[in-house]
């Protein structure tokens, strides 16, 4: 496995998230290709402002999934507020006519583009099972002496499935 970590002056590692956002009232506004493309552009612009990378993005008719990489310096809450806030503001400011009929119809429900909630999950190359196996099996080296003590210490990646 070839792994690349982000390094700074005092730490090395990776921090990735899977996020899912839903439009207001879970309406299927992303069936419109132009709405998808504009939202995509504004999400990428918001990610650039945050200093994170969108590694993958995919739309369903009524939601969007994002894979954010390099999230070490921002909190989930701040990232979500920035991405949803920026894209919503831009879409409502310049492109309301593309989705207004889906979100508001004949009634004035709200002026929001996204629903209030979101899904997030941390994502890495190491699974919970790998960490569990590392803790259960990998710590014996501290209790037994081996003939090859000069060998490099094993890391979590050595225990990955």
Image (spheres, rainbow, N blue to C red):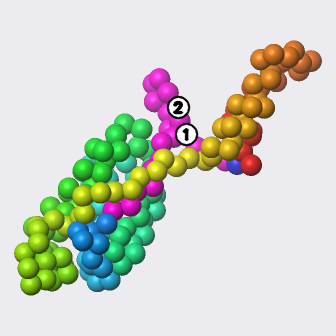
Q: Please report contact status of discs 2 and 1: CB closer than 8 Å, yes or no.
A: yes
Gap in Å between the C-alphas at discs 2 and 1? 6 Å
> Residue 102: x and y, percent?
20, 81
Rendered position, 84 above or below 148: below
Q: Is residue 8 above or below residue 143?
A: below
Residue 44 visible in the picture: no
Is 146 inside the magenta-drawn segment?
no
Q: Residues within 10 Å of mark 2 (few under 14, many from 20)?
A: few
Measured from the top left, where is residue 94 in percent x and y? 11, 71
Location of mark 1 (residue): 5
For the image, the number of numbered tags is 2
Q: Which residues are magenta?
A: 2-21
Residue at the location (75% across, 25% down)?
Answer: 139
The part of the image, by quadrant, that contains residue 90 is: bottom left
Q: Secondary structure at mark 1?
A: loop
Closest to the observer, 130 or 151 = 130
Residue 19 drawn in magenta: yes
| Callout 2 secondary element | strand
Say which residue appears at 50% left-offset and 33% top-offset: 7
Write down the quadrant of residue 89 in the picture: bottom left
Q: Position of residue 113 (x, y in %)?
A: 19, 67
Residue with the mark numbered 2: 12
In the picture, measured across the screen, residue 94 lies left or right of residue 138, that is left
Q: Residue 122, percent across and down?
A: 48, 47
The correct choice, above or below, for 138 with respect to 4 in the image is: above
Look at the picture and state if 86 lies above or below 108.
above
Q: Residue at x 27, y 77 (%)?
A: 27
First in sequence: mark 2 or mark 1?
Answer: 1
């Amino acid at each position: 496995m070839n792994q690349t970590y982000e390094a700074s002056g005092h730490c090395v590692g990776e921090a990735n998230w899977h996020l899912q956002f839903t439009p207001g009232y879970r309406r299927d506004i992303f069936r419109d290709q132009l709405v998808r493309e504009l939202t995509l552009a504004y999400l990428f612009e918001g990610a650039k402002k945050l200093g994170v990378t969108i590694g993958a993005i995919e739309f369903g008719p009524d939601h969007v999934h994002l894979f954010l990489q390099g999230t070490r310096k921002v909190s989930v809450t701040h990232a979500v507020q920035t991405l949803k806030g920026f894209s919503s503001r831009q879409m409502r400011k310049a492109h309301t006519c593309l989705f207004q009929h889906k979100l508001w119809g004949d009634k004035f429900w709200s002026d929001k583009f996204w629903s209030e909630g979101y899904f997030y999950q941390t994502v890495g190359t190491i699974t919970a099972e790998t960490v569990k196996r590392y803790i259960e099996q990998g710590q014996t080296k501290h209790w037994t002496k081996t003939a090859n003590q000069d060998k490099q210490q094993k890391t979590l990646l050595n225990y990955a499935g």
